Amino acid sequence: MSATFVQSRSTTSSGVTTVTLAYTSPNTANNLLVYCTGALTASAGQAGAATDNNTNTISNATTIEGTSNAAEARVDFVQSCHAGSNTVTGHNANSDDIILQIWELAGCATTGQPKTTGTVANSTTLSVSTAASTAVTGDAVVGFFYVYNAPSGPTLAAGASFTNSLLQNATADLTSGMSEFKAATVGGTQTADGSQGGAGDPVAQIVVVFSQAGAANHLDEDYWQGPRPRPSEPFITVY
Amino acid sequence: MAEILNVSVQLFGAGTFTSPTFTVPSGIANVTATFVISPLDVIDQAKTMSFTLNRSDGSGGWIFDHGFSWQGGPNNLITGLARNPSIRVDVGPLDGQQCQVVMVLSKPMTCSILVTTS
């Protein structure tokens, strides 16, 4: 079963400690939720884990510190969500800019997430690849990019191969965030990419691959579904 | 950018302020709420605000859509100055809906509220 897009939303707030955003529609039980948070922080770790109000279990996929620890990006997720209305809160202990982008994806495995991740701390080129090459066709690929001191106006654009994306420019400061989703069309190493306008600024970058439901990372004994020979039976019949 | 709600500068008491109902236009991309807080209040770390924007459920109730929490003080990493809070969302379920703003203050504060399309 290939991963599919269900819904997404985006918000940004300036000069605040938390920002909260509701999903447009209630979540469907057992879907995958992805919470992307970008925050201007004075030091590492001040962008806290996203929280929600639907008693979901939230885990961190990966976190990356940008220039001078100022642009911190993190991707949190719920691998098997509860059904119902849900609002998500992004946190910044530094009381500054926060960008929060939330996704709901269907067709993903409800255990063992994420499959693999990758990060780039600071690069003007938007391209970040997974550390492992274990993705298979149909896995969910999510990219998240967060930039501080960007030129004003829309600066980030999603990669052409991504089917869904969110772009969010801050209301006051020059920060911008972009997240994107696709179902992998080929196996192996996955790359999240995009582009930015203007002179270009160093961008904190994250890619996360989530396993689709019912697909194995590789064919081995645990996933073999065919009949198994009994110990007493020969593997080769000789006539 | 068009104005949707404009609450002029005034002294709000501690507690809850609920705005008049307003309608978000259909077909817009974003909704932005901006606060302008008096210079004395914006640097006061004892001042806090909880902001929410709700949409009508069509039967007299309200559904939370988005919000933030703010505290006064020198909270801007770039300038080192205190700053006015603001929030922008993609319009999502607010499109064409009746909405209200709810602001909860810890102490009296002078500010204005402006909600716009953006």
Image (cartoon, grey):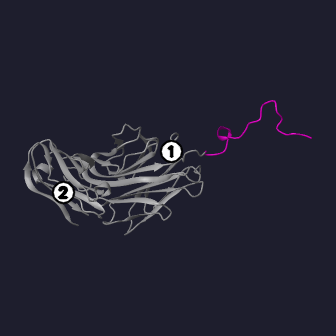
Check the image and name the residue furthest to the bottom. A198
Left or right: residue B39 compared with residue B60: left
Q: Residue furthest top?
A: A232
Question: Which of A186/B39 is in front?
Answer: A186
The amino acid type, in three-letter code, at marker 1 is: Pro
Identify the disc placed on residue A114: 1
Name the front one of labels 2 and 1: 2
Tag 2 and tag 1 share a subunit = no
Percent x, y of residue A209: 51, 50
Secondary structure of the residue carrying numbered label 1: loop
Q: CA distance from mark 2 to mark 1?
A: 42 Å
Magenta part mainly helix, strand or loop? loop
A171 vs A180, left or right, is left
Magenta residues, as a range? A216-239
Is residue B69 visible from the viewing direction of this image? Answer: yes
**Residue A26 at x, y = what percent?**
37, 46
Residue behind mark 2:
B22
Q: Residue furthest left?
A: B11
Is residue A17 visible in the rendered structure shown here? Answer: no
- Under mark 2, the amino acid is Phe
Q: Residue at x 71, y 41 (%)?
A: A226
Task: Residue at 40%, 45% (x, y): give it.
Answer: A27
Residue A227 on the magenta span: yes
Q: Residue furthest front?
A: B59
